[in-house]
Amino acid sequence: MRLLMTLVLLLTLCGCSNKNCKGNGSDCQEPSCQTADCPRLATTQVTPVAEVAATPQVVTEATTSESVVAEPVNEPVTVVPDTASAVQALPQPTSENPVETRPVNTVSEPVSAASDPLMDIAPGEERSEVPVVQSLFTIDFGQMAPMADAESFLVTQGFQVKHQNGKMLLSLQSGKLVVESRSGTLAFSGKETSQIARATKLKVTWGADRYPDNTNWDREFLREALGIMVMFGTEKFGGGIFLPNLPYLIGFSLANKCQTGNLYEGAYYKQTARYMPVNCSATEGQEMTTVLDLKDTFKKAFNKDMPAPSGVTISVDSRGSRNGSKAWIKKIEFLP
């Protein structure tokens, strides 16, 4: 009888007295088992399957009352936590070993077009760092081999080189198109292209080693060491007797003794041409990357919407100078 009572007491402590419960306390599956008769289950918090599936799983070594020796397995085993047995196998949070959960953002906010850092560039503004944007049209002199006869090279690229009152000396040196002029030079090298029709920005990497000594833009001596002129539209206008008809144009100039971003009229094409000096405070020999907003500048210059850009011209004007000028370009890019 004493042996029988001892056996009943052990069964009560190690199992469930409810007849619907099977196995020991840790294996009780029936809801009716979760009573005071099953103390081990009654004190265990069971995490719902939906929460387990949404929570990153942490694999830990489970400790049981019996030692289990497993053979090494070469292939990984994936356990899907979608059954009740998988729920019980997970380590449960306790006061001594809390489980930290963190919300995870899986949806990224769309990028607004207004966040484009190129959208707020003022006329004549210089940017030292420019985000990478797909170029519509690029002239990269850094990719070209050094050569003395750079004028012939430009002709093969579709440019038309014209000289007045002297010769513009062109050469490719150290990844740059070097443009040197003697006193009295007014010269152009222009190209028409439909590739820039969708452009709204102009980016130029350039610098001047020597400025004309007679420059003073505020006194209408609009001289430049180097300029990039952009043509707009296909309609052409006269500028005076013996002058060719030209479309709207804006010339961006490397010059000194000027006000950066101001727009000036020239002696000719007063209704359809404007000239804007940039980087007026730059020192000789300084390399600069200039980014210009074509739409805003055109609106400011002519008080109308910008026609599609249609051509680009490299220019130099050192007329009346005693020392001429010398400048260079590394890269010209038209950006959307």
Image (tube, helix red, strand yellow):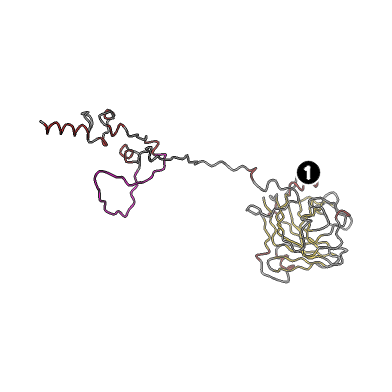
Let me know if residue 101 is in the magenta part. Answer: no
Is residue 153 depicted above or below 241 in this figure?
below
Q: Position of residue 3 (x, y in %)?
A: 12, 34
At mark 1, the secondary structure is loop
Outermost residue, bottom side: 148
Let me know if residue 66 is in the magenta part. Answer: yes
Is residue 330 depicted above or below 41 in this figure?
below
Q: Position of residue 70 (x, y in %)?
A: 26, 51
Q: Please name the amino acid that badge 1 sits on.
A: Lys
Judge left or right: residue 72 versus residue 286. left
Q: Quarter of the image holding residue 267?
A: bottom right
Query: Where are the magenta residues, as a range?
Result: 53-79
Is residue 313 depicted above or below 304 in this figure?
below
What secondary structure is the stretch in magenta mostly built from? loop
- Residue 224 versus residue 68: which sits nearer the camera? 68
- Residue 145 versus residue 247: which sits nearer the camera? 145
* Residue holding disc 1: 304
Q: Residues within 10 Å of mark 1 (few under 14, many from 20)?
A: few
